[in-house]
Image (tube, grey):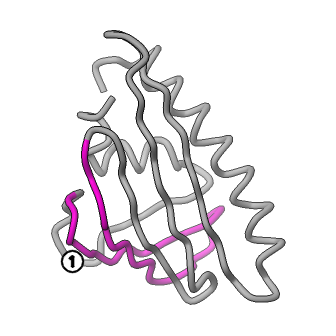
């Protein structure tokens, strides 16, 4: 699973079609200390530039500080815990702050992360060669 987390193709797969990301010229590197910009589309609507700053990226935790013009704070942490040699517990922790839009963003994020979890299961169970 960790190997798959390092690929931008994985992000695209698990987020699609609810959200799509297109790199804005920079090299995408999932490593601590790196920031990059993506063009974000939500449900096909252009949300503009989305910035991801990777603060931690290792086999136990991935943490980012993200923002865009609609959501000034979207901090995301992925926690990974090996259960045995074939199973990993994966948890998303998300902190969102968007002023008066926060309840609407929270509702969408809740649906979005449920969607991501379904896509992760499909990717890991059905498409192991991905």
Residue 108 in the figure: left or right of residue 79: right
113, 43: nearer the viewer: 113
Residue 59: % across, % down: 27, 38
The question of residue 48 being in magenta is answered with yes
Q: Quadrant of residue 83?
A: top left
Q: Quadrant of residue 32?
A: bottom left
The image shows residue 81, relative to residue 17, as above or below, that is: above
Residue 23: % across, % down: 30, 69
Which residue is depicted at the point 36% across and 67% down? 22
Residue 99 in the figure: left or right of residue 69: right
Residue 83 in the figure: left or right of residue 103: left
20, 102: nearer the viewer: 102
The image shows residue 24, relative to residue 58, as above or below, that is: below
Residue 73: % across, % down: 56, 79
Q: Provide the residue designation for mark 1.
A: 25
Residue 110 in the figure: left or right of residue 130: right
Q: Which residues are magenta?
A: 31-58
């Amino acid at each position: 699973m960790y190997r798959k987390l390092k690929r931008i193709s994985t992000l695209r797969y698990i987020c699609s079609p609810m959200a799509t990301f297109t790199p804005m010229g920079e090299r995408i590197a999932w490593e601590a200390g790196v920031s990059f910009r993506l063009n974000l589309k939500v449900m096909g609507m252009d949300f503009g530039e989305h910035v991801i700053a990777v603060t931690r990226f290792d086999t136990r935790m991935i943490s980012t500080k993200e923002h865009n013009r609609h959501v000034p704070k979207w901090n995301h942490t992925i926690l990974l815990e090996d259960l045995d040699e074939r199973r990993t517990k994966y948890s998303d922790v998300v902190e969102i702050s968007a002023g008066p839009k926060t309840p609407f963003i929270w509702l969408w994020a809740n649906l979005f992360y449920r969607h991501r979890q379904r896509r992760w299961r499909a990717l890991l169970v059905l498409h192991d060669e991905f």
